[in-house]
Image: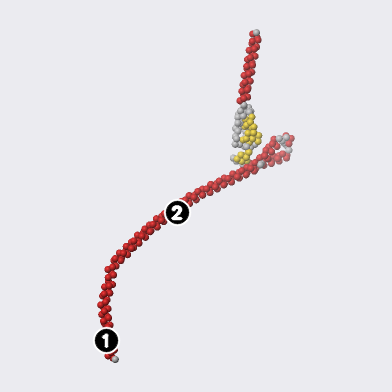
Amino acid sequence: MTDEKKNEKLDKVTEAESDNDERADVAPVEESATEEPATQEPTAEIEDVEEKEEAAEESAEALTERIEALEAQVLKLEQQAQEYKVGWQRSQASFVNYRNRMETDKETWRRRATADLLKEFLPVLDDFERAFQALPAVLERLSWLDGIRLIERKVRNVLNAVGVEPIPVEPGAPFDPQVHQAVMQQSLAGFEADQIIAEVQKGYMLDNLVLRPSLVVVATEPPVIEEEKQEEAEQATDATASTSETDSQTEEEA
């Protein structure tokens, strides 16, 4: 039994040594096999570089297209911004014009409303004036008349305070259709055509607005027909006188 075990151990040692020898023989072959791919590395690197260059070119083209698209979009947005700016400026100008127009209209409405109200006081002044003109001399010294005159002055002062002034009218002044209204025309010595002869009713103005025009009598030129008739009458008188002289001379000669 002991010898058999020894033999088995010797066989195992022998097999182990043979295995080592086989591994030593195979190792160079494996090293040579691993050295072959090293000769193929430059080709793979070239292919990798070419692929990277192609990918870079493609990315550059894509980036250029992207930049062009972004530039076109920016240009479009700038155009839209300019259009919006012009539209905003027009809207702003329209709003300013509208506000100014509303303020002007508001002022016009206010003046018209004020003018309509003040017109109601003008007949009161007319009544005061007519009453004072037709006042009998017996009543001139009565004390209550002074109170009435005071009321009349207060009314005029109130109207003057808000800008109401009478329209000045003088005989011989030229007729102005903007502030005067002719109620009568007549021919009168000392007055030329379109001159004011007299004022029938006083007119009033509120600043530059005519509340009521002045009613006036306007002069006209004498009719031409009357002058012609007068000349004809004078000529007929002269002819009659000459005829009578001729007849008297003829009778004396006879």
Q: Is residue 183 above or below residue 109?
A: above
- Depth check, front residue: 149 or 98: 98
x 28%, y 72%: residue: 34
- Depth check, front residue: 109 or 143: 109
Left or right side of 102 for 131: right
**How far across and how far down the image is residue 231, in percent?**
62, 21
x 27%, y 83%: residue: 15
**How far across and how far down the image is residue 248, in percent?**
65, 11
Q: Is residue 190 above or below residue 44?
A: above
- Depth check, front residue: 76 or 247: 76
Q: Amino acid at mark 1?
A: Leu
| Residue 209 visible to an observer of this rendering | yes
**Quarter of the N terminus within the rendering:** bottom left
Q: Is residue 152 above or below residue 196?
A: below
Q: Amino acid at mark 2?
A: Leu
Left or right side of 159 for 98: left
- Other-residue count near label 1 (Cα within 10 Å), few / some / many at <14 / 14–19 / ≥20: few
Q: Which mark is residue 77?
A: 2
Q: Secondary structure at mark 2?
A: helix
Q: Which residue is mark 1?
A: 10
Estimate the spatial distance between the alpha carbons at disc 2 and disc 1, rounded to whole Å.
94 Å
Left or right side of 234 for 135: right
**How far across and how far down the image is residue 109, in percent?**
60, 45
